[in-house]
Each structure stands twice: as C-alpha cells, then as structure tokens.
Amino acid sequence: MTMLRRTRSALPGVVMSAPAIIMFGLLMIVPLALSVYLSFTNWNGYSAHPMGVGLANYRRLWHDPEVLHAAWVTGVLAVVGTIGCNALGLGAAVAISRPGKANRIFRAVFFYPYVISALIIGFLWSAILSNGGVINNYLTSHGHEALPFLSDPDWALGSLIFVVLWSGFGLTMVLYIAALQTVPASLIEAARIDGASPWAIFRQVTMPSIAPFVTVNLVLVLVSMMRVYELVLALTGGGPAGQTQTAAYLILGQSFQNNALGYGSAQAVILTVVTGALALGLTTLLRRRETAVAA
Amino acid sequence: MGRRRASTALAGIAAATMFMTACGSGSGKSDAGASGGEGTVRMLVNITPNLTQSFWKDLVRPFEAANPGIKVKIESPSSASVDTTLTTELAAGTEPDVVEGANIHPFAERLLDLSGQPWATSAPLADKLAVDGKTYAVPVGVQLQSLMFYNKDLFAKAGITAPPTTMDELTADMAKLKATGIKPVQTAGDWVTGAQISMIAAPTLLGRQPTWYTDVNSGKTSLTATMKPVLDLYNSWLGAGYLNKDALGVKYADGEAAFLDGKAAMYPMGSWFAAAATNPSFPIGVFPIPAIDGTGQAPMGVSPTANYAIFKSSKHQDAARKLVEYLTNNKDAVTTQLKQDGTFRTGFSYHGSELGDAVQGILQQVGTNVGPTGGGYGPDQLPAGYDTQFNKNVQGLYIGQSVPTVLSSLDKWLAAQPK
C-alpha cells in the first residue's frame, strides 16, 4: 500500500517533468553521445558508414598547432571576457542601479547590445574597425595613419575582446542590478551610521550579499566565452592569418569546410569536457567561498 | 533505409554538438506524387552578388513555360556555401534534385551518371570533372583565374607601353609604378589573399609540373619543393612595397572598389571581375599572368562554372535531366548565365564589354593549355579545406612569417589529411 501510495504521489511529478527530460535527452544527451562516437571515426559528413580510427583524432589534436592556438585564444577570451564583463557589469550596476530617468536610459543603452544578434554586432564593428571602416576613414582623411584594428594579429585579438565585452556586459549589469536590490537597506544604513566608508560598505556589506549572483554571473559568462563563434565569423573571420580563431570557430571550420566531422567532433568533445570542468570547478570554488563568508 | 537513418542521426550530432544552428532547407524531399518528366524539381544554387534569387527564377522561367508539368524550386544555401549546405542535407537525406556549383567529387557516387548524354560530356571541362571516367557534373562555362587586370591610364603614366609577358617584366613594371608614386598591385584580406596567390602560382606550377595535383596528393612532391619560388617572388613584392601591406584588413569588395577608384595599377582576379567592372572611369586592360619560367604561352588557371549535377535519389530524374540539359545547352540560357557571371565558353559569345571581349580573346588564345588553380577540382583536387587553409597560411606572410614556415605548415596540414 505504501509503495502504491508513493508511486501515486510521484506520478504527477514524473508526468510533468517527462517532456523536459525527453527534450533534454533528445537535444543534449543523444547528440553528445553520438558526438563522442563520431570522435572515434573519420566521418567526412557524406559517407554512410564512418570508419573507426580509435584515438587517432584525439592524438592528432594535441599536435595540431591550429588547435593549440585556438585553445590559447579561447583561454584569453575566457579569462579577460569573464573578468571584464563582470567588472564592467558590476561597475555599471553600482553606478546606475538607483531609480531615475537617466539611469533607466543608461540601463537600456548598456543592455541593448546583448539583445542584438552577435552576427549583426560583428558586421557592425567590422564596418567601424576595418581598414575602409568609419574610424580609419576619419583618421586617413585627417592626415593620420590608419590603425590595424583587424589586420594585425594583436590588434585583432584586442578588437575581438573589446567587442565581446561591449556586447556582453549588459547582461551581467542587469543581473547585478537585480542583485543590488536584494541587499537589505537596513544593513547599509547600519554600516553608514557606524561610520563605514562607501568602499567599506561595498566590500563588507554589498559584496557578501550578492555573492551568489557573482557566482552565477561568472559561470554564465565563462561558458559563453568558451563558445564564441558568430562574433569571430563576422568581425575577423578568424584572421588575420587564422590568429583570432576560437575553439568553436575552428571546430566548425574543421568539420564542414574540411569535411572532417570526426576530427571536429573530437575537438567538440574536448571543448565540452573542458567547459564543463571549468564551470563546475568555478561553481564549487565560489560556493565554498560564499559559505565561508556567510559563516 | 538503415543507412539513411544512421546518416540522419549523424547529421543531428554534427548540428547540435558543434553549436550549429539548424541549417536544413526545411523543405524536405520533392513532392512524391509526380513522376517521370513532371513534378517540382528542387535546385540548390549559389547565391552571389551576380547570381541573385531573382536571376535564377528568371533563368528557369522560360523552361517552366516550355514544360508545363515541371516546376523549378530555387533553393539558396542555408549555411555558408552550397558545399556546407549539402553536407548537412546529404547526411539528413534532404538533398535537392539538382545542385549547381558544388564540389561534387566527395559524393559523386550519389549522383546520376550522365556519361551517356552527349550534351553533358561535351560541356566545357566536363572531362576534367569526370570521376573514374564518368560524367556527373555538367558545367556551363569556364572562369579564367590567372588574369591580371590593369589600369591603362596608370600604366601610361608610369611609362609602360605594353602589358608584361614575363614575370621579370611584370616585376620591373611594378618597380616603375612604385617609383611613379602609384600603388602597383591591389590585394585584400578575406579569401582574396590566398586566391590571388593561387592565381599567380598556377601558370608556373602547371607549366613546370602538369601532374602537380596528383604528385602533391600522392606525396611525390610537396608545396615546399614546388611553390617556394612563387611565394619567394610574392614575398619580395610585399617587401618592396608593391603590394598593399594593410591587405588583411581590406575586405574583398573594398579591394575591388579601390582598384576601380584608380588607387592601384593592377588587380589579380578571375574573369568574373569583367562583369563587375561596368562603366569604369578609366580604361581597363587584362593580360594572362605569366609563369616564372620562359617567355612562351604559360598554362592558364581555369575553373568550371555553374556545374550542374543530379542526385540519384531524385524522384524526378527525367525532369531534372531536362532542366540540366536546358541550362547547359540552350543558347539563351547559357548566354544569360555567361554574361551574368562574367564567364566564358568557346562558341558562345555575347555582347559584353570591351574588357569581356579581351578575356574571351585570352580564352581562345590559351585553348586547351589550361588547368586548375587553388584546391583544384575533379580528380585534380587537393583535400577538402585546402583553399581555406592555404589562405590562412599565406596571410602569414603579411604578419612577418617566412616563406619556409608558411609552406612547412601547409605541408604538415596536407600530410595530416585523411587519404
């Protein structure tokens, strides 16, 4: 009887969650499993029967200079992008979180790039930064040398990072604004009465209160930085000389332009594992810190 | 069916795991009700600034009028190109009936053998595209690749009275132009850097080693062993300031516009540029890019254009065959396509520009002394992705990499590709 009752009470939950579980399985687990399978083959995208190649794809990618360079670019983007987006987002949130017409306008302006397609943003900034773009046209028409925003490898990576930050910090800003609303006003008031400086209040009161939001923001941005693709496609095309290719950009190129879906899958599997591990590691670390601060 | 199911599953994984948005055409197979010479024929085509959706629709309209039972549905690539679109469509089993302008070699076994059709086998370069002696693709015309367009006014200003016929003369002319304060050659980033170098290299490579593609593929020779003289020469032009050093930040369209604005004296480009150079503000000439060796007629790099192929899986093979025959043999249809995309075919002339006539003259002059450029086509084809890889690597010259480094990277890449 107890068993039957338990089953009956669990049934609505199972039924309600079944669609989500089925969709998750079909759209995430099955493709992931197939990707792992493909990574052990030499499938070219056309043949009906991929040939097994064992660990050859995985061995190859450790010696592929393009893969290693793309991993470096992705790493730089992940570190600078994650820290930059959060620092800018938090700074902007603190500056404009109070009610007011001007602040509402600033919030809309800062958040707006986030809602635009990354491809459009890429093409837009390409039109601004390319040699024939707005800035260089202005410079050359005023007797100055054009700046190699997209034609020099270091400048191009800098340009990519700038556009990533510009287009991405709006989301973290909105989340931080929401977080700041949750900080008890009484705590801030008490600290102020005790003579704490604004910086001390921010460090000792605000930050501990919004720590869970910081964790979420850092992980969200980190994961998105690990798979930057459209911006690279539209802004630099991976160039110059392939120097701004990210892991996601290279995977797509290797897979479809080179008809090497097996090799591309091996890279995708590694990227998925690394992204998952980083996200999990960061979450664990920050949760531990939150607990320590709360204690 | 099992095969198709497996392929469909594999396509799913490719799309989902690689952060790819779904890019199937969404239209599925053609209507199954019709058969024989009737029905709706799905045709996947290249969409370019010259070849727009409306151009393709207008092109097939007379065919539809003459064949009331047949409708032609023009499909645009749903991803970067016809080839990448086909990769996903073939895997998912949603390939069209007819495809235009695809690299058919990797999936030739899935195409209809047209070897028994004289109208197909007699098409330009059809023999070069044949796989195991069988004709699967029917080109409409050819694009000449190894061409150098030049600004006649700027040549005259630099005291150059006739276009160069040897590489030494070409280099000397660049020096004269530079000394006159004129930018000698317009280059660009995007895909252009690699394409232009391939165009420049083809006459030398094909002249020295007609079996170059086969030899590179078999490992009998390498890029380091064969392409170094051309890249050394190109790099010396770069070092001497004959090429614009900011090329990698210049888009294809901007590079073309710069030449048409009179900002450079020469522009290495394929024959399609003749169609784009309408109403130039100065007279434009064209000459075949010479080989490094000798003064004789160097081979010309050419590529087939608008090659049409029919899939075996088509439920409307007769209708598709009629359509392809019309598009590749009907005088009006062929001429319209040639004119629209600045391509050429012996025996089919059209009233074009003076520049177009000059290109047609070069085509007649080179005759059969032609071969592929870049990644090649048909059996003379380097591994998939070669052109992209070549472009990435040779752009390294602009950021200070040496010729041996660039060529060694390419050789390593070639060696790593599945045979």
Image (cartoon, rainbow, N blue to C red):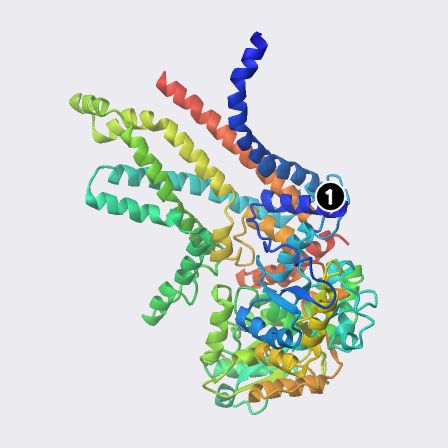
Please give the name of the residue rendered at 72% of the width and 60% of the height, measured from the top-left corner.
B314
Pointer 1 local density, CA inside 10 Å: few below 14, some 14–19, many at least 20: many
The picture quadrant where one finds residue B212 is: bottom right
Count of number-bearing discs: 1
**Residue sitting farthest toward the bottom:** B161
Q: Is residue A251 visible?
A: yes
Looking at the figure, which quarter contains the C terminus of chain A? top left
- Residue B99 % position (x, y): 67, 64
- Work out whether A164 lies above or below A147: above
Please give the name of the residue rendered at 74% of the width and 75% of the height, measured from the top-left corner.
B125
**Residue annotated with mark 1:** A41
Looking at the figure, which quarter contains the N terminus of chain A? top right
Which sits in the foreground, A16 or A295? Answer: A16
- Residue B316 % position (x, y): 72, 63
- Work out whether B29 lies above or below B148: above
Which sits in the foreground, B317 or A286? Answer: B317
Please give the name of the residue rendered at 53% of the width and 18% of the height, measured from the top-left corner.
A10
- Residue A50 % position (x, y): 75, 46
Tag 1: amino acid = Thr
The picture quadrant where one finds residue B200 is: bottom right
Q: Chain of mark 1?
A: A
- Residue A278 % position (x, y): 52, 33
- Work out whether A287 lies above or below B164: above
**Residue sitting farthest toward the top:** A1
Element carrying mark 1: loop
Q: Is residue B301 visible?
A: no
Q: Is residue B124 left or right of residue A94?
A: right
Q: Is residue A111 left or right of residue B235?
A: left
Which sits in the foreground, B314 or B178? Answer: B314
